[in-house]
Image: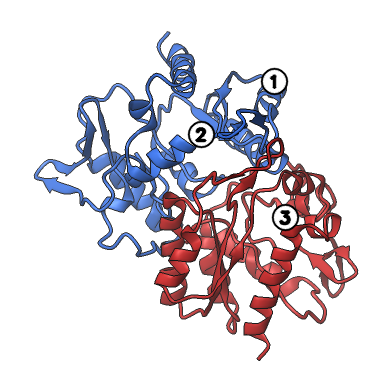
Chain colours: A red, B blue
Amino acid sequence: MDADLHGPSVATMLGFEGKKLQGSSEGIIPMGVSPNLVAVSMASLIENSDAPLIWRGPLKMMALKQFLGEVQWGNLDFLIVDSPPGTGDEPLSICQLIPELEGGIIVTTPQGVALLDSRKCVNFLRNLKIPILGIIENMSGLKCPYCGKNIDLFKSGGGEKAAEEFKLPFLGKIPIDLNMVNSADDGKPYILQYKDSDTAQIFKKIVELIIAQIIK
Amino acid sequence: MDADLHGPSVATMLGFEGKKLQGSSEGIIPMGVSPNLVAVSMASLIENSDAPLIWRGPLKMMALKQFLGEVQWGNLDFLIVDSPPGTGDEPLSICQLIPELEGGIIVTTPQGVALLDSRKCVNFLRNLKIPILGIIENMSGLKCPYCGKNIDLFKSGGGEKAAEEFKLPFLGKIPIDLNMVNSADDGKPYILQYKDSDTAQIFKKIVELIIAQIIK
């Protein structure tokens, strides 16, 4: 469920940009992405993908309520909510609308200014009494495609340090990968296209660490 | 003026993180950054920099109103408002609170999913009848510090293409620069620390293109 209402890029990344959600007598039918993945994004509700959503908080709360209550999600193993950056209306609404949220996952880049925001997220979730499943360090270094050397573009290790400091699980470091940028733009999930890559293994390990905490 | 209330990183980037704003009988005194720059950020109003701002739209509107109306800005040449990504409450409030806004500047990275958001921003500003001063392409390539080759990390040219399509001025491409990441984290503006670098020249050119449109 794409809770980034102003920048609903999940639709592009999962390859259903431009398609509109259909309704049935039982509710909204989510987009089928793969045999075991359905998704809902604001991108599939607005007519023109270039049209901005000029909505304030109360309308956004209503939209998220509809996503949660009126979509025929079926029998899900997991509901994953992708939230926009920050501690604004969207994550606040999600935390208040889902009574038994298993937990929040914080994704950060390693540089100082990004970590500052992540520290706010930790305290945001703690204030709302939501368990925190861990911190993921994204855009953590890059291998030069020409010389193969590792470039710490946005520094490295910042996410890990923050996890230690807050006594939270550190879930892993995801490097920048040119293939991932292309996969996202082409709507073909990276982990399906490059399932044997080192980065796909990192994703798999992260998922295992998350699942281990949820299914006890 | 830092309008990113949930992620007020301008305070870190300009080196006044941790300092609190002071009031006088005439209003709030903005932070002095350099002889010709003062700034105001939510980071200087909250007690603890790790504390999240758990506010919905109406409170945010009030804060921005205060920033605009109760800060002793003095006789400014320019008021530059840094807005969070997207078309949410913060930019909407700014556009509604400043009656004679000179224009909006759209900053985007070149990859497809980011451009999609930028196209929404163009239409957001057009809907609100705010002139658009142009598009800047940020994180536009990177020179490998080891082999010197250029890496198009998030693709390249997307911002320029969008500007053409929307018949908007293209203001320039800012490459990723490890020194810029460090400057931001250290609170020492890059253009002061590295004023002779190629990237500083790009910044200068962008500013000239903007000023030429405002001062006619």
Viewer-closest of A175 and B123: A175
Q: CA distance from mark 2 to mark 3?
A: 28 Å
Q: Which chain does tag 2 point to?
A: B
Locate residue A71, reporting x and y percent: 77, 71
With B147 as the anchor, is B96 left or right in this view?
Answer: left
Q: Amino acid at mark 2?
A: Asp
B127 versus B212 height, above or below: below
| Residue drawn where x is 46% and y is 52% of the image | A114
Locate residue A169, reporting x and y percent: 53, 75
Residue matched to label 2: B177
Q: In the rendered structure, are the residues bearing label 2 and label 1 in contact, judged by CB atoms less than 8 Å apart?
A: no
With B179 as the anchor, is B165 left or right in this view?
Answer: right
Viewer-closest of A62 and A193: A193
SS of the residue under disc 3? helix
Q: CA distance from mark 3 to mark 1?
A: 26 Å
Locate residue A160, reporting x and y percent: 49, 65
Residue matched to label 3: A10
Q: Which mark is residue B164?
A: 1
